[in-house]
Image (spheres, rainbow, N blue to C red):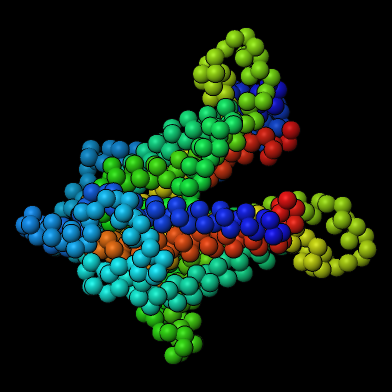
Amino acid sequence: MSTAAEGRAPLMAPATGATSPLLARHRLGPGFWIPMAWTIMVVGLAATANLLPLRSPNDADFAVISNWPDATYWFGTDQLGRDILSRSVFGARISLIVGLLAPAIGLGVGIFFGMAAGYFRGRIETTIVAAMDAIMAFPGILIVLAVTASVGANTAILVLLLGFLTIPAFMRVARANTLVFAQREFVLAARAMGATHGRVLALEILPNVVIPMLIYALLVVSRIIVIEGVLSFLGLSVPPPQPTWGNMIADGQTDLGTLPYIAFVPSALMFLTVLSINLIGEHLRARTDLRGSAL
Amino acid sequence: MMHYFLRKVVRLVLVLLLVAAATFLLLNLLPGDVALTLLGNEATPAAISQVRAELGLDRPLVLRFLHWLIGFMQGDLGRSTITQVPVLESIIDRIPVTAELMLLSQAFALLLAVPAGVLCAYKAGSRIDRLISSAALFLLAAPVFITAIMLMFLFALKLRWLPSTGYVPFTRDPAGNLAHLALPALAIGLSEWPPLFAVLRADMIKTLQQDYIAFAKAKGLSPAFILLRHALRPSSFTLVTIAGLQIGAAITGALVVETIFGLPGVGRMLTGAVYNRDLMLVQGCVAVISIGYVLINFGVDMIYALLDPRIRQ
């Protein structure tokens, strides 16, 4: 049990790290908290968008068409006189809903198959790995395009589709971690005491597998936000006039030379959000990764 | 090597069949009727069943798949449901644009990643290493369409160094062709080099700790010679694998930058076809791109085997 416990110790230890150089090295600094604050702010604003004193995101005011950012319109208005601040806040919703729910599906299904493959090995593992390889033989974006071509796109379809496409990667991470823990003495001990496979998987292996999985999930979240951005930029995500960061950038592209802020505002928001999530994931990974630590 | 190659070829054929079947099923099992798309919503049931019969849609799925597969292998991908142009012809017309874009973007990505990776591994922990590594982390967060728009804004619209949209064939005007492709390829390259850089740097640092590197240093060989001749090849295995996997990301990149920069490639045709619900064209594009993707990954596996004799066993 030793290495696993040591590896996770910093996460659970109270903030007495100053005494230990190892813990001090892994103390979370501004490089973690600034991205965290940004992410919490974006999620908070998107979640409470209806309650905020914002103009309706689709309310076109022809008196203020293409208004550069000023004191009234902090982020300016677009070519139809819609408030970009309001559209940005509401647009964050689609990015976040798809970006959080799709990996949640992939994580749930992937962890199930990955643990089954890594724990039971043999024919179960071969079948699961082959099926996942088959999904990965396809460039995922093409599956998304083929499906949206025949049934159209809405939030639910995107979540299910992108969630499905993240299953193989989650399965691999879960399987790799399960392979390691399934060999450990505490698993053997639990089996020797008569624990069923289900009990061993749920109580002995799952708690060890779930932390690296959640950290990996952060990476997937940022990737899915980008893919949703690509799709809505191409006009293949949720239909207009519902704002998304991607379709706002596409709207801005037509007047990029004269009204660059229309594309720049949503671009900057998406960039900062993806960067923040990546940085949070990177810090947590460095903190929980045994090989990267000074052990 | 021969045995390894044969095993890989058998696998390749299986994967190709799987990809063909998946493409076919994807567009034939989903709701959304080709006949209905062709005729519009006001079509009479009689007209629909007639079109379905003409297209062979009333026959069992397995027969339809075999029929499609045989046609596919003979190069018959059907006709666009909207323009009636043969799908294969449209794709062949546009492949040179996309292929050139992909090649250039991969070249940009490797030209950035390899020197940066070697330098940062050599100077690991130094200021320059930290600078380049942070730049890579930042660019990793910039989606390709945002990079593309920023490049277009800066180099095409403000500085006016390069054209913002359009395309000229290489055969007609080589310089103009490269000028039109430079920004699109750079946009994909910039969003692709960070992972390549990261794996090369990590592997190279490990290689540089090997005894034979210490021995080469002791012999008095120059650092540049050691880095490029002794250390680069054994450090590039993961790089090659990742470069193959990245082709998937490059396909997404091509879809996007072809649309942004108005390049007449397969990617732009595919997004247009999805938009117009031109299912035959979508099916053809998806099949051809996926097969290209599988073949490129097969090629990558072969390169990998040539680079590292150990994995042939």
Q: Position of residue A203 (x, y in %)?
A: 54, 18
Q: Position of residue A53 (x, y in %)?
A: 22, 43
Q: Position of residue B199 (x, y in %)?
A: 64, 54
Q: Nearer the viewer, residue B298 or B66?
A: B66
Q: Is residue B243 left or right of residue A57?
A: right
Q: Nearer the viewer, residue A150 or A184?
A: A150
Which residue lies at the image location 56% right of the left edge and 53% below the top edge?
B11
Does any portion of residue B110 appear in the rendered image?
yes
Residue A46, relative to residue B177: is it above or below? above
Residue A18, relative to residue A79: is it above or below? above
Does any portion of residue B271 appear in the rendered image?
no
Seen from this angle, which residue lies furthest top?
A193
Q: Position of residue A47 (x, y in %)?
A: 30, 38
Seen from this angle, which residue lies furthest bottom?
B172
Q: Is residue B98 left or right of residue B211?
A: left
Which residue lies at the image location 55% right of the left edge and 68% below the top edge?
B106
